[in-house]
Amino acid sequence: MTTTSSIPTATDPAPMSAEQDAVRAAGLRRMKTIALALLVGLAVIFLVAFALQGRYPWLQYVRAAAEGGMVGALADWFAVTALFKRPMGLPIPHTAIIPRRKDAIGASLGDFVESNFLSETVVRGKLAAAHVSRRVGRWLVSPGEDDGRTGAQTVTAEGAVVIRGALTLLKDEDVAGLIEGMVRRHVVDPPWGPPLGRVAHELFVDGHHRPVVDMLVDRAEEWLDGNQGTVIDLVTERSPSWVPSVLDGVVGYKVHSELLKFVRAIQTDPQHRVRRSIDDYLLRLADDMQHDPVMMARVDRIKESTFDDPRVRGFAATAWDQAKAALLTAVSDPDSDLSRRFTGLVTEFGQRLCDDDELAGKVDGWLADTASYLVRRYRHEAASIITETVERWDGEETSAKIELQVGKDLQFIRINGTVVGSLAGLVIFAIAQAVFG
């Protein structure tokens, strides 16, 4: 024995629960019974009135009313039935309209929706009337009735869920590889010589290197001033063995004295030739880094050797691990500094939407422009969903489901047709009797 699943498929024209179907089917049967009962009743009245109108002339009016009612009932029965199937199974032209012309109806419905609903004018008008920015602003700053949370707090909580999910799905090695690839592509692969040379040239021209030179000269002066014995010992160690030790001491003292005097001269004279030589050398170095192929290649070799170090290559993985751990900790705690700051920013934005007319107007304008672009660009694809969905439906099943949805209301047409036909028949017969009777 086979069973069918109650889960609706993509080809179901109108997925409904079995309970709803049962209720609608019962209502449809009841209305059909009422309409048929009226027709049968009028037929009985017509036969009785037709048989007795010779004896009772006033029954002619009753016969005319019943006759008109039967004609109206039959005509509307035919019209309603012809929508869904062939009346009495007869191959009458222009019947069973929905099963036979399902695809054309779907295409027409899609065109109708595209022309009348998915238009820029309609969308802009709806957005302008909705005042979306004001509503969003009030929602962000107002506490909810259920849990007392503001919209900003809800945005923070839902955003934390999304971030945690995204971080869980991401593979650490993939992210680390992406970071390393981006660093190599944007930092390591481009030549460093020219840009570093340009930056260095600007720094050296503006004299930003001189405080460093001053610091080095000061440290040299301090060391020489406090290490006279060390200098004398160095001179003595490097002096030939045949030189008397007394002379070594004198020479060492003189060397120390001259070095200290030389360093202090550099220290006190901003225009000392050593300082100018350092300036010239640094400017030449900056120029070579920009234009000398040998120097440029040397800089790139230093760069490559630095980034090829395993510790540097592992920096991407370490940085991602630390950033991921910190972010997970922050988003998991609603009282964390990150969560509170984000909630505050969203709340502030919502309050500005409520109070700042200019900002609200800009947001509404941006939404309208975005919606207009989407409608203009994709409205045909959106409307084609209707056409393509209807094309996938089975004709007979579609007809049955549509009849189940609207058939009950259509039976009122039969009832109204019966009543109107009866009144029309009575009025026509009465006028004819008055004119020709």
Image: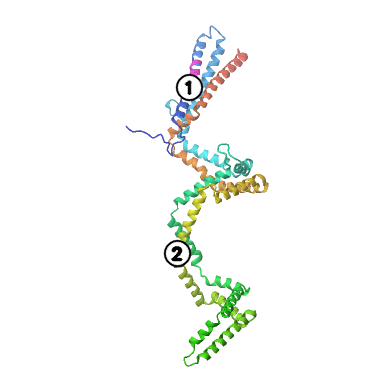
For the residue pair 150 and 352, the one nearer the viewer reads as: 150
Residue drawn at (58%, 18%) of the image = 423
Whether 203 is drawn above or below 131: the answer is below
Residue drawn at (51%, 84%) of the image = 233
- The disc at residue 313 is 2
Visible residue check, residue 92: no
For the residue pair 220 and 57, the one nearer the viewer reads as: 220
Q: Quadrant of the C terminus?
A: top right
> Marks 1/2: CA distance?
79 Å
Where, by quadrant of the figure, is residue 223 drawn? bottom right
Callout 1 amino acid: Arg
Q: Position of residue 79 (x, y in %)?
A: 50, 27
Residue 103 in magenta?
A: no
Q: Quadrant of the N terminus?
A: top left
Q: Position of residue 436 (x, y in %)?
A: 61, 14
Q: Position of residue 254 (x, y in %)?
A: 57, 87
Whether 338 is drawn above or below 237: the answer is above
Residue to which mark 1 is pinned: 30
Q: Is residue 102 left or right of residue 257?
A: left
Q: Is residue 33 left or right of residue 139?
A: left
- What is the span of residues highlighted in magenta in the rendered image? 31-41
Query: Farthest residue toward the top?
Result: 55
